[in-house]
Image: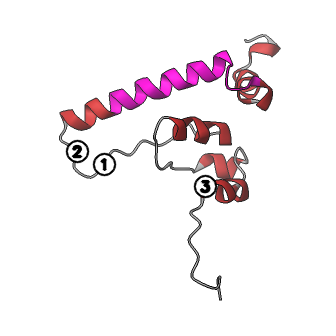
Amino acid sequence: MYPPEEIPETVTARGSAPSAGSGSLARAALDLFISCYGAAAGDFALAVLARGGVYVAGGIGSLNDLSALESVGVHAAILGRALYSGGLDAHAVATRYAPAVRPPGGLA
């Protein structure tokens, strides 16, 4: 088994904590992974002549993950388990990412 400080959930929480900051090794690894994964997905889309876009799901566990995706040009994300398991707060996500589209005069 893993030593207590190396349990995957502990390492993930430690790496995505606000104290880790944008200069952390965990953030650099995540940025590299997202870039490589995106390049591979793009290559695959070209190889199979995808015409309706490429959809990739899974792995979103925090607002930090959404920020990392946004920083590399991802325009949308599929959120499922993270919302249901409590990893993401739906209100926090909606507050930060929901488009500010309101009819004139507000909602009736």
Quickly name the residue at label 2: 50
| Residue 10 as seen in the image, left or right of residue 100 | right
Q: Are marks 3 and 2 in contact (CB under 8 Å)?
A: no
Q: What secondary structure is the magenta-colored segment mainly?
A: helix
User: What is the x, y in percent for residue 70?
Assistant: 53, 41
Sequence-wise, the earlier of marks 1 and 3 is 1
User: What is the x, y in percent for residue 17?
Assistant: 77, 30
- Please tell me whether residue 74 belongs to the stretch shown in magenta: no
As helix, strand or loop, the secondary structure at mark 1 comes to loop
Total labels drawn: 3
Q: Which residue sits at x=22%, y=44%?
A: 50
Quickly name the residue at label 3: 97
Q: Amino acid at mark 2?
A: Ala
Quickly name the residue at label 1: 53
| Residue 108 as seen in the image, left or right of residue 14 | left
Does residue 61 appear anywhere in the picture?
yes
Query: 19 or 8, which is in the foreground?
Result: 19
